[in-house]
Image: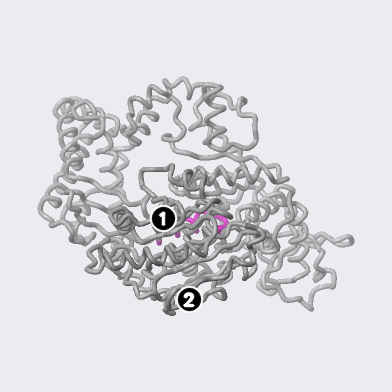
Amino acid sequence: MNKDIEEKIRERIRLQYPFPPYESQLDLSKDIYMSLAQGIKVSIFESPTGTGKSYALIEGALNYLDDIKSNTLIKVKQKCQIDNDMPDWFNEPDVDLKLNPLKKPNINENKQQKKHVKLIDDDALFDYSSSEETKINLRGQSLNDKIIYCSRTHSQLKQFINEIRRSKHKVRVSTIGSRQHLCVNQSILSKANNNVNKLNHLCKSHKKQCSYYKSLDTLEQYTQEIFDINDLLTVSKKCQSCPYYAAKELSLQADIICTPYQLLMESIDQYIEPIIIVDEAHNFGSALLQTESCEISLNQLNIIVGGIDDYRKKYHQRVKAKTLYYLNQLLQICKSLIDKIKTKQSGNLITLIDFMVEIGIPKLNIIKLIKFVQNKDMRQRINGFIDSSQNVTHYSSFECFCKFISQLILTSQKESILYIEKSNTMKLSKINNYSSFQTLIDKSRNLVFLGGTLQPLNEFEIFKEKVDTNEFIFKEYPHIISKDRCQLLIINAQLDYSFKQKNENLNQLMNQTNSLILDIEKCIPEGIVIFMQTYTFLEQFKQYTKVNNLQFKKQVFFDEKQNSQILDKYSEVAKKGAILLSVVGGSLSEGINFSDHLARAVIIFGVPYPNLDSFELKEQININGNQYYDNITMRAVNQCIGRVIRHKNDYGLLFLIDKRFSEDKLRTKFSTWLQNRITIQNDFKETNFFESFKQIL
């Protein structure tokens, strides 16, 4: 690629920043712009936590969007060599590309069709069709192009939207949310009684009677350009209108649609080949797996059978023969599932194909059956019988059943596993994202993944397999801090953290852990954040310190699953000196900003391998090999490490207490920016790391 062109794009983006950007931040913005302009199908960018990657994303994507709106793009050549057969003016780096006026792309159009662009020069106008020789790859864009931005939570979406407000770009932004977050009809909410499935059903069936929905005849009251979820609720309550359906309407007019991961797959069909940007992408794969996994219990199936039977008895003389035929098929499936749950031993995997044959699914036209349930409003009718004869908490039974059957027939043995849990529940668990990722590739124009700790890249290898080599890129960026501001110490202490829940030397392990914390805290000013392997081990250590009346120099706080105020209490005293003990993979291990005095050190005790009792994990390892086990573990470790450095002037130490961290198979999986900052010690020795920062302290 011509460096002059890249520099031109980079400098133009720099002028759009409302503050002086870091150099790596500016590089990231430029690379995001380039990947979109070149039509790269899948782009993966890793920039360390604290480097301003979310704002870099905004400038890269919105500068591109501005150019699409104005119908002009800076010339971009992908892996381009100067063509000596072309006139001199063609090879000049400052020639601009002008896109022909374009209509919305036809999704049925041949994807390989050449795109036509116009090259504008002071003296010449030249129509040119991009070819393999010149490697120009610009995709025709619609003036109505959409960017779907997704992250893990609504709080993260709100942070992103606030960053957009800081920018100089004029864009329309809307946020998609669930009814659980956006319904304001108190009558429906009280009837739903916190049951999500019932809330969805009541909303759909009563929306024509809902005063909030009726007031959506016009969206004139939604006058602002940028909406986060709180804005939607505020305006809707003021205007007595429905924020859920308002969000859907506003998204059709918006340039950027923000959505949590869980709603992406159902949102993508609303738009024509959108650009999809996934932030904090290390969470994305697992979130999709959870969304598309489902289960059905013996109790729920019995409730469904009773509801269908009651409906048949009451209406058997009034319904059509075809309706009775489908109802009988539903009963057949329910009873077959009941028999299998009763006869199959819990803890055993069930072969999907054999199972579907056993319960008679291949003999049934499931697609027509599912359409019957949906189109004939049978959900409402059967749920009505279940709701009247059972408690409201059972209302979701039929919804779970419909989802379970749909997922069962649409999945494969390579994608999902089926097993019986001890609680008389049949679970269908998604174990890979092959089909979901293929859907994203097929329905999007560009896919951009961004994160601070994406390596190891095992789950993203699927994308690399599914697209052409020239349509996949991965780039990583250096940290903004100098080497002397962050160091990683691996302590090969003779502590056996590769323990099971029952450890014969648990007391000795607790004593040595306590001693190490005492030694380290003497050398660390202000706050220390400690991550342990499991909540079980954390609780054991808490009880050990309590029983033995152990005292620390700093005030100690233990993370508790049900206590969200621990972080606030720790933050109040961290500057004076405090220790916060939490768990790898817990609520405090990612997404929390432990900047400055909140974490002058992060300590991780033990390699936090996930529990191998999980059926899903066992199958994922069987498919992907043992390296998969190491990869997901080290991604969690890298997330914890990312808590310590949050901006350019921050500084801190990292301690990993386990000799296994020094082995090549794990050490090579640390984020690249850490590789030249690693020191290995057999035992902890006093550190003078903070001597140079005493004046700051």
Which contiguous range is marked in magenta? 434-450
Label 1 environment density (alpha carbons within 10 Å; few <14, some 14–19, many ≥20)? many
Seen as rendered, the residue at the extreme left is: 343
Residue for badge 2: 668
Label 1's element? Answer: strand
Three-letter amino acid code of the residue under disc 2: Thr
Left or right: residue 432 versus residue 240 is: left
Dividing the picture into quadrants, the one containing residue 395 is top left
For residue 581, the mark is 1
Q: Position of residue 663 (x, y in %)?
A: 42, 79
Q: Position of residue 31 (x, y in %)?
A: 66, 63
**Residue 573 magenta-drawn?**
no
Question: In the displayed structure, would residue 643 be above or below residue 473?
Answer: above
Instruction: Give the mark toward the camera: 2 or 1.
Output: 1
For residue 403, the mark is none
Way the structure is coloured: one colour
**Residue 449 magenta-drawn?**
yes
Task: Name the residue rendered at 82%, 64% in the picture.
Answer: 94
Image quarter where the N terminus lies is bottom right
Dividing the picture into quadrants, the one containing residue 51 is bottom right
